[in-house]
Image: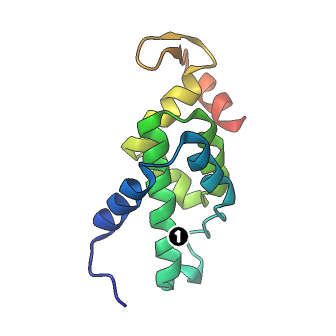
Amino acid sequence: MHDERSPDEIIAAHVAERARLRDDEVVAELMELTPLPDEDDDAYESKSTWAHVYVFVALADVAAIRKLRPAARLLLQRASYAARELAHGCGAFASLEHCVIARRSMPCARCSTTKPTSSATKQSALSR
């Protein structure tokens, strides 16, 4: 059966399905998720690869909404280079990334953790 929904609609449905999950269940699903193929991989010709990408993006959205810091490293580990670059421009990932990076520096009212002091701090936090 062909899914006539747009990618945004598919991702929103995945996010809604995961709304009932506990935080540890979301993290567990991320742990089980296989890494995305690199951007030049022929796998992207397959609808199943795109279905996998939509789940990945939905999990990133859920993690950002809930500020699930343990999810950030898991997402980066499972992202292809292209997806990591895409994620840095994604609002959901940016929100989650802020909390992960922030907890390593100064107090931050936005997420009750810490705030980055420099771009070097940001790069260092992402590489951990």
Q: Work out whether 64 lies above or below 14.
A: above
Q: Which residue corresponds to the image point at 39% horizontal and 54% vertical from the top-left?
A: 15
Q: Work out whether 7 lies above or below 23.
A: below
The reply, left or right, for residue 37 in relation to residue 8 is right
Q: Secondary structure at mark 1?
A: helix
Q: Looking at this rendering, what residue extends furthest in the right direction?
A: 128
The residue identified by callout 1 is 52
Under mark 1, the amino acid is His
Q: Quadrant of the N terminus?
A: bottom left
Q: Position of residue 94 (x, y in %)?
A: 44, 38
Is residue 13 shown to the viewer in this render?
yes
Q: Nearer the viewer, residue 21 or 52?
A: 21
Q: Quadrant of the C terminus?
A: top right
Q: Work out whether 66 lies above or below 106.
A: below
Is residue 119 shown to the viewer in this render?
no
The reply, left or right, for residue 24 in relation to residue 2 is right
